Image: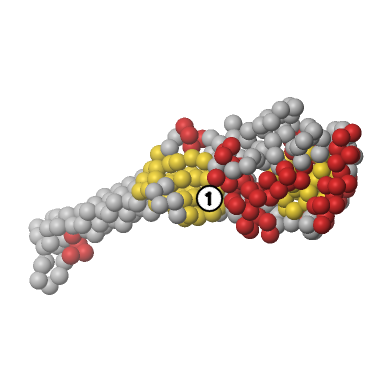
Amino acid sequence: MFIDEAKIFVKAGDGGHGCVSFRREKFIPKGGPDGGDGGKGGDVVLEADRNLRTLLDFHYKQRYGAERGAHGRGKDQTGRDGHDTVVRVPAGTTIRDAESGQAMADLTDHAQRFVAARGGRGGRGNARFKSSVNQAPRHAQPGEAGGEHWLTLELKLLADVGLVGLPNAGKSTLLARISAARPKIAPYPFTTLVPQLGIVHLGDDASCVVADIPGLIEGAHEGKGLGHQFLRHIERTRLLVHLVDLAMPAGNDPIADFEVITSELQAYEQELMQKPILVVATKMDIPSSKDAWERFRAVITARGFRVIALSAVTGEGIDRLLDEIRRALII
């Protein structure tokens, strides 16, 4: 199951308490203070792992804590530091403070780390407080409390190419055609409910990762149809492939459909429109698509977009699409 958002609680280890102790040995009945310091509490560390693909595990376990530091001991023995707790998250995870929503870290590279909660410092033992005016201090510091936070984890897929379009525009069929991915395909809208990834070979040992984003609807930038959850997965892509279904029922306008998605991308994040965008007219194996093609091509080209036509069913135009993707990614 693909889960791309989770909320967790992290609690670092408390520092160990300092020790109150005095040297007591044979022939030294009144030795000085020898209480050791407490150990530092362990940190809670989030680490990116490229082998993980979902935040599902965090729906079953929400609380993560690190070990507290050991208390100081006599004979000036410092307590052992607490062990850190390392929590692995998928590469591409953004970490936010759950209360303020402020971004704290963006883990995009494998093995990249973020200290989500720092362990408390150990308290000082009474040996630290000895002075010329206080030869036998009888107090020590308690350890500091470890940090704790509620965090929100948001996963944004790491893909080179994002497929966008209205529901049933043919994105899943195309992904299945050009990669080994096997998304669910059916002749009705919202067949794809979670993003799908596929590795596409572009020739000469070159390849890229393509993400099939569930169909967007008007108002997606406001969260309609889970728009926010879907749109964030194309923020990291280098190229957008905008699919438009030309085999539409009479009275529907593919150009209007193109404008719906374009407006949603702009409203969600203006920078998305600064990415290279390739417009693809789909379902060209259906006769009605050929009738709409010339007008659609002329209008979209006039607006400055590269546009191609293809049929994922027959394979028409697939090679040109892969060439255009390779050229856009400069592989």
Residue type at the position of mark 1: Thr
Q: Quadrant of residue 21?
A: bottom left
Q: Quadrant of residue 155?
A: top right
Residue 189: where, in percent of width, then height? Answer: 69, 31
Is residue 83 left or right of 74 when viewed as pictured?
Answer: right
Residue 292 x %, y %? 85, 41
Q: Position of residue 270 (x, y in %)?
A: 62, 57
At 71% across and 28% down in the image, what residue appears? 188
Give x and y (percent) for residue 56. Answer: 53, 35
Residue closest to the far front = 251
What SS does tag 1 mark?
A: strand
**Is residue 77 something one can see in this rendering?**
no
Residue at (82, 35) in percent of width and height? 247
Q: In the rendered image, is residue 62 in sight?
A: yes
Residue corresponding to mark 1:
94
61 left or right, relative to 301: left
Q: Nearer the viewer, residue 256 or 61?
A: 256
The reply, left or right, for residue 141 in relation to residue 96 is: left
Q: Total number of numbered labels?
A: 1
Q: Nearer the viewer, residue 29 or 77?
A: 77
> Please, is residue 4 above or below residue 142 in the view?
above
Quadrant of the rendered image containing residue 76:
bottom left
* Location of residue 123 with respect to 186 vertically, above or below: below
**129 relative to 109, above or below:** below
Q: Identify the residue shown where x is 20% and y is 62%.
A: 127
Closer to the camera in the image, 28 or 74: 74
